[in-house]
Structures are given as structure tokens and as C-alpha cells.
Image (cartoon, rainbow, N blue to C red):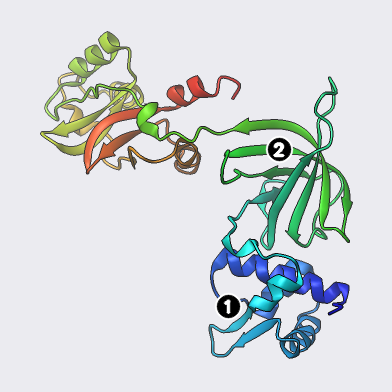
């Protein structure tokens, strides 16, 4: 069947949002992504329902789902099993857009690296000069950053000049954490904790009582305690941070990088079966990514 450009645009956006959120999608959400009038989208949805390309879901949490026929009509037979590959614009993730293909158009040029980015969804929101970030991709964990210098709305594609490419390690953090774990007893004094840090060339350690994690203490915590006139004979339990960020040993390194940024922390405790087994710091990550 011959769909109009707006029908294809609405249907692709519906499929993208449906796979992103795993629920029925309201017409207003599609209109917001496409920057179109909600009434226009609703009218087109009636036509798409008549063509058996979408299913209407009633109720307060209702909306529209793409039908199996819709995937075939748009030649997206493999998309149902596909992963979501994020694209962000000027630092903000773009809803309703999923990167389906990356073609490197120049690789051997000494000064230029360009790529053609094909998107499932609308490219109307993107403008020439926008900074974009793509990924990580599902298999190789490739992250690409660059600037848009061209776009083709008819083919839903962007031309970008690549400024940075990183392949994030797929190994879990157990391969990068510091071991054996050096911990401190809650009754250890600030002075003794300082000595332990200096002798072991570390900047922080978990405070543990047996296998129980009580908190974490860092050089910054010690310095703050001394700056406030707290005696060096004070137990570290009085200066530690009790809100400890943990991560399972099988967590991928790229997930921990995101957690460091979101929580604004410099280290976290690695646990296995609920028991601390190591620690990973920003320095450990910089060792993996010396260019960062």
C-alpha cells in the first residue's frame, strides 16, 4: 500500500516510542516528537487503524500499538528483536529516535571522519551544527560524538563530522577493580586511617565490621574532620560517609561510568553475593581510558 509521508512519519515514530517504553503510545506523545498538531495525528491514526497498521488501546492508560502488519509495511521485520540505540542532541536524549545504521563515509582521510547516521524516527528536530552523541551500540558498545553538517528528512538520515569514537569495554568491573580489598574497622582512629592510606597508596576504604559494610571513608573525609578541629584520636565511624554506592561484580564498566557521573562520586564498592570484594575508582577507569 502507498502511505503518505506523514503516515510513514507517524507510524515510524509510534514504533520507536512503543519499543522505547513498552506500552501503548498516546497521539499527543507522537505529536510532541513530530512537532505537529495533536488533532492531525489523531486523524491520521484513524486512517492507519482502517489499514490495520495500528491497534487502538482504550482506557486512561490506552493509546496506540503498532500491528505486526506495520513492521512489514515499513520493512522493519527485524526491528521487533532490535535494541534501542540512543541519540542525544546538544546533551539531551531525543525521544522517538532510534539509530538503525551507521555508515562511515570517510575513514582514510588524515583530517576528516564523516558518517551517515540512519534513524528510525523523525529527524525534524535536528539542525545543522547540532552536537550529537550516539550509543552505546549493543554489541561493540561503540559511542560516537560529532556535529551535524547535513540531513535528509525523506530518508531519515543525518550526516555528521565525527569528533570522537570510543569502544566501551564489555568486561565486568571485576576485571578492573582493586583487590585485595583494604578495609578499615569502625574503631580505627583518624590518625591510623591516614597511616593506612599513605602506606597502601589509596585514597579511600570501606569501613567494615566483619562482613557488614558500614560506610566508606576517604582522604577528603579525613581532611574535613581535621579542618573542623576533630581530634585525630576520633574513630573513623564519626567521619565516614554511610551512604555507600555499591555495584555487583558482574556490572559492565560502562554502566559504572554512568553511575559515577549521576552520583558525582569518585569510587564505589564492588560486591559479590552481597559481600564487598573490591573497590573501583575514577583512577581505575582513567587507566582503561587514558584519553578521557
Q: Is residue 45 above or below residue 276?
A: below
- Residue in the foreground of this view, choosing between 70 and 236: 70
The residue that label 2 is drawn on is 145
Residue 276 relative to residue 114: left or right: left
Q: Quadrant of the C terminus?
A: top right
Q: CA distance from mark 1 to mark 2?
A: 32 Å
Q: Residue at x 44, y 33 (%)?
A: 171
Does any portion of residue 14 appear in the rendered image?
yes
Dot 2: what SS?
A: strand
* Residue 173 point in image, percent of width and height: 39, 33
Residue 85 picture location, percent across and down: 63, 51
Mark 1 crowdedness (10 Å alpha carbons): few <14, some 14-19, many ≥20: many
Q: Residue 193 appears in which quarter of the rendering?
A: top left
Q: Decide which of 264, 148 is in the foreground and name it.
A: 148
Q: Residue at x 64, y 79 (%)?
A: 67
For mark 1, give the secondary structure. Answer: loop
Q: Quadrant of residue 7?
A: bottom right
Q: Where residue 24 is drawn, which disc sits there?
A: 1
Does the rendering let one see residue 32? no
Q: Position of residue 120 (x, y in %)?
A: 73, 60
Tell me: 25 left or right of 280: right
| Residue 173 to residue 262: above or below | above
Seen as rendered, the residue at the extreme top is: 199
> Which x, y percent locates residue 196?
23, 14
Q: Residue at x 45, y 27 (%)?
A: 282
The image shows a total of numbered marks equal to 2
* Residue at image point 54% right, 87% down: 60
Q: Earlier in the sequence, mark 1 or mark 2?
A: 1
In depth, the one of 231 and 25 nearer the eye is 25
Within 10 Å of disc 2 (Cα), the crowding (few <14, some 14-19, many 20+) is some
* Dot label at residue 118: none
Picture quarter with the N terminus = bottom right
Amino acid at each position: 500500500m502507498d502511505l503518505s509521508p506523514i503516515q510513514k512519519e507517524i507510524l515510524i515514530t509510534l514504533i520507536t516510542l512503543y519499543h522505547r517504553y513498552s506500552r501503548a503510545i498516546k497521539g499527543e506523545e507522537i505529536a510532541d516528537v513530530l512537532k505537529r498538531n495533536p488533532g492531525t495525528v489523531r486523524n491520521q491514526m484513524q486512517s492507519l487503524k482502517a489499514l490495520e497498521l495500528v491497534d487502538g488501546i482504550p482506557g486512561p492508560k490506552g493509546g496506540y500499538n503498532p500491528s505486526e502488519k506495520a513492521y512489514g509495511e515499513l520493512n522493519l521485520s527485524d526491528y521487533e528483536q532490535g535494541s534501542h540505540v540512543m541519540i542525544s542532541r546538544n546533551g539531551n536524549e531525543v525521544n522517538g529516535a532510534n539509530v538503525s545504521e551507521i555508515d562511515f563515509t570517510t575513514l582514510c582521510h588524515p583530517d576528516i571522519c564523516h558518517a551517515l547516521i540512519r534513524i528510525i524516527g523523525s529527524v525534524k528536530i535536528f539542525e545543522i551544527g547540532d552536537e550529537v552523541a550516539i550509543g552505546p551500540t549493543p554489541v561493540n558498545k561503540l559511542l560516537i560524538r560529532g556535529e551535524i553538517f547535513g540531513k535528509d528528512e525523506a530518508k531519515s538520515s543525518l550526516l555528521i563530522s565525527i569528533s570522537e569514537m570510543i569502544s566501551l569495554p564489555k568486561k565486568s568491573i571485576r576485571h578492573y577493580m582493586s583487590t585485595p580489598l583494604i578495609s578499615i574497622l569502625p574503631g580505627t582512629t583518624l590518625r591510623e586511617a591516614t597511616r593506612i592510606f599513605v602506606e597502601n597508596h589509596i585514597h579511600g576504604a570501606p569501613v567494615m565490621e566483619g562482613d557488614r559494610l558500614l560506610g566508606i571513608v576517604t582522604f577528603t573525609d579525613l581532611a574535613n574532620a581535621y579542618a573542623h578541629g576533630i581530634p585525630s584520636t576520633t574513630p573513623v565511624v564519626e567521619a565516614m560517609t554511610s551512604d555507600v554506592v555499591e555495584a555487583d561484580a558482574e556490572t559492565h564498566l560502562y554502566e559504572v561510568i554512568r553511575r559515577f557521573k549521576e552520583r558525582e562520586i569518585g569510587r564505589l564498592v564492588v560486591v559479590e553475593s552481597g559481600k564487598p570484594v573490591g573497590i573501583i575508582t575514577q583512577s581505575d577507569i582513567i587507566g582503561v581510558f587514558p584519553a578521557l
